[in-house]
Amino acid sequence: MSRHGLRIAVFAAALSLLPVAGVAHAEPPSNDDFDHATVITALPFAGEVDLSEATKAPDDPNYCSHLESASVWYSFTAAEDVTVTLDFDGTYVETAFYTGVRGDLDPVTGTCDSGFEVRALDARAEVTYYLKVTGSRWYGRFPLTVEQVPRPANDDFADAEVIGNLPFVGRSVLAAAGTQAGEPRASCDANPGSPSVWYRYTPVESQSLLLAASTPSGYNAVAAAFTGDSLADLTEVSCIDSHRTLFRAEAGQTLYILLNAPSTGGDAVSLALREAQPLQPRLEHHPTEPSMFDDIRFIDQSWDPEGGGNSIVRLDFGDGTAVTPIGVSYADHRYAADGDYTARLTISSWGDRTATTAEVVRVRTHDVGITGFRVSSSARVGTTKSLEVAVANTRYDESVAVTLYRGTAAGFTAIGTLTKPVPSRPFGTVKFAFSHTFTTADLTEGAVVFKAVAEPAGVRDALPGDNTTIAPATRVLP
């Protein structure tokens, strides 16, 4: 052996003779094993779950078959039948209840839960229940609260909670609720026989109502509204499954509302009832200044604050005609004569809601036209020639602007505008006189084309086809 190897061997032997300090190990929680389950002796119970050093015994039952790493045990024996809730302060754990003895434990049906929710147990008198709480060790310590849940006061139809003023929100823990004999099954209920409670509401006036049901854990809450006087003669009016619905309620007719949900444990189920928001009817028409020559498009621009959309029940044009468009939100209409017409739109939406709006449609047919345009057939450079535009008008007195344009190979350019009153008369015209001095630029073009455009001021011309005229070309000479 080398000297270096000999030194290492001697040093290692010396170390082996030194005393070794003891290593501290954290202890498992006192209720780590089934035989030492924490006994819940009185309610309410407040304790602390400690999974930081929890272990798993070889014979621990694993009814839920999810988490395996760490578990602790509790036991509970009630003197009478009671429903309790277990709240783990929002910690994600897996729980299951058992009855029996070690080595022969029977899982309690329906008590295997994984998640953050509050659990519930229907405990029978003098039966000892064993609770296994399983989770990851890094969860550490977290609170556990066990409380008795009273039977809801409105568990039976005859004890339905009275809903007074709207809006109303009711919350019920269904863990201790039952199902009354003869209770009707709601049409949208996929889990008949679930724990339920009852409410009743009598509207003072006929109204459309919104009914909603929900649970914080996402379970299917069912709310159904009925009319009638007893369980035996109830007639369903509306039913909703974990969402909302709208329906019509008649003044003085009492509604009985059934609320139920499966497997909600200690979570509260919410029922909401309020009056539905009214429809917001709105009617538009285009063009906004129509004439008797226009096919006017009437458009339903209504809005439903409840998000249900709407349809047209009736669109009355105010001239003795009305339509009910199917599948579209508009209709076209032409009026036979000028006048003021009151168009009325009636719409409907879910919950039997209707609304009507009206607007006045002012039909005015403004129409001026150019009936003559006199220009010279030729002109010499440096001379000034007159041009005359004749404008006719047979409907309303108008103020008309006539613009004169000079046309070249590059296009038309405005060279002057005249504005005059043009009264309405069956015959005759109003003359608009212009003049133009021809230049060498006109000579370069060889010929000049003049265009006249007549426009009534502040109104839309119903037939603009005769508002523009182009005169024959004027030949330009040196």
Image (tube, rainbow, N blue to C red):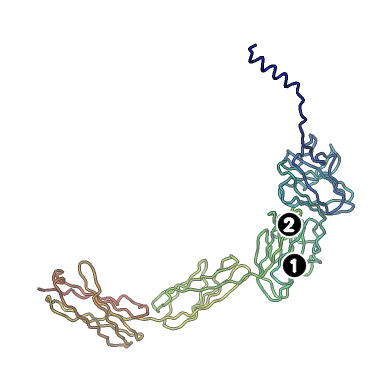
Tell which of 324 and 436 is nearer to you. 436
The disc placed on residue 256 is: 1
Tell which of 234 and 64 is nearer to you. 64
Q: Quadrant of residue 173?
A: bottom right
Q: Which residue is mark 2?
A: 261
Q: Judge the density around disc 2: few (<14), some (14-19), many (≥20) Cα neighbours within 10 Å.
A: many
Residue 216 visible from this viewpoint: yes
Q: Is residue 226 left or right of residue 462?
A: right
Badges 2 and 1: C-beta atoms under 8 Å apart?
A: no
In the rendered image, residue 101, in percent from the top left (x then y), is placed at: 86, 40
Q: The residue tagged with tag 2: helix, strand or loop?
A: loop
Identify which residue is drawn at 13% across, 79% down.
Answer: 383
Count of numbered badges drawn on the protein: 2
Task: Name the N-terminal-most of marks 2 and 1.
Answer: 1
Point out the image quarter for the C terminus.
bottom left
Q: Amino acid at mark 1?
A: Tyr
Q: Is residue 15 left or right of residue 457?
A: right
Q: Is residue 419 above or below residue 326?
A: below
